[in-house]
Amino acid sequence: MPRTAPLLRRIAGALPALLAALAVPVMLAVGYDVADGHVATGMAAGAPSAHDRGGAIDTHERGRAIYNFRCYFCHGYSGDAKTLATTYLEPKPRDFTASTLTRAQIAEALRHGRPGTAMASFEGILDAADIAAVAAFVEREFVQERRVNTRYHTEANGWPGHERHAAAFPYATGEVALDAPVETLTPPLQAGRRLFVTTCISCHDRARVSDPGPDWSARPVSFPRMGFEPGQPNLAPPPDAVSSASVYARHEVPPDTGGLGAAERRGAALFQANCAFCHGADGSGKNWIGRFMEPPARDLTRYTLQTMPLAVLEQRIREGLPGTSMPAWQHVLTAAQVRDLARFVAGVLYGRAPVPDEPATAAAAPIAPRR
């Protein structure tokens, strides 16, 4: 799953206010609505001015043009704040369609900003007539009438027949989390996810995810030194200023096979000999190799027989998983070995409580089998 560093996202979120404060006449083309994808057209240079327009268009349309230039990045082209900026600003931008603001209140916010939020003052950037035009437009268009303003994905903007990409819409709207396990998705949703992550994500970003992840997460950038070997935790060095292997070594402790049946013990041996290199000895995929891979190795402890039935698991082992580093094992393992391996994974690793991601200061205790 692609994850944009939140610090960089916060910096990007500050750009509209910074540009507004500097009165830089640049249009940020990536700021369209996450939900419907709206954007202004024909405004590549400076924002229109009430004085430039004179009596050519009425006040409402002047307000629309200024709003589409100055305000869309945070509030969205339809005033509902379904924007990328909303996902990383706190407090979030105002959803005008869910508010009861008056024209005077909107004009006040435009003049003086909203302390404690990303809403900057536009006094000195917009004159009194422009502020009045924007306030009137927002009140009528969004607060009162809750209308769709300007659509981005139109034929005029170079998007003919946009509805043919409808399979990806649930991810753009946030109806489906982008990090939902692929196995739980219907074939149309799987196709939509592939379309979204290869095309739409460049502007819509990750839309909605169930697990946003840490602000910063450690990941390996070179092979661990000092004799570290995957699957051999006793060789891992203690935490020090030279090696970062020990944080991954916690996941190289194999489960205790005592009490397991014969098939599960055979599967355990097969797992450690063939699968632990990528998935870690504990099946979490949080070992060094598993975290280094793109995409990372699957965390097998997250699955259950409902989310990954035994028959599907055996198929994944036999045929591999396209788009990942998971190879097909059908020409390496026999059918009986695939069955034993699957029974070990499902019977022992599925649903296991995760091992904390922190360096161990003493030898980690063996993981008892889940029964």
Image: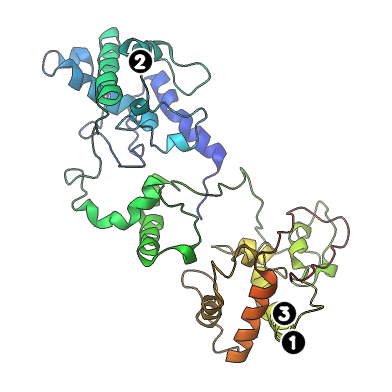
Count all numbered tags in the image, as a single digit: 3
Residue 268 bears which disc, if any?
Answer: 3
Question: Residue beneath label 2, please?
Answer: 106
Give the class, few, some or many, for how many residues have Cα within 10 Å of label 1's Cα (few <14, many ≥20). few
Residue 307 bears which disc, if any?
Answer: none
User: Tag 3: residue type?
Assistant: Ala
For residue 131, which quarter of the picture?
A: top left
Q: Is residue 334 visible?
A: no
For residue 256, which quarter of the picture?
A: bottom right
Q: Residue furthest right?
A: 362
Give the class, few, some or many, for how many residues have Cα within 10 Å of label 2's Cα (few <14, many ≥20). some
Name the image quarter holding the C terminus: bottom right
Q: Residue at x 34, y 12 (%)?
A: 107
Q: Residue at x 62, y 64 (%)?
A: 299
Q: Residue at x 53, y 79 (%)?
A: 311
From the top left corner, tell me how far across and down residue 188 is, in percent.
35, 64
* Mark closest to the chain's N terminus, 1 or 3: 1
- Position of residue 283 relative to residue 199, above or below, is below
Question: Residue beneath label 1, please?
Answer: 262
- The secondary element bearing badge 3 is classed as helix
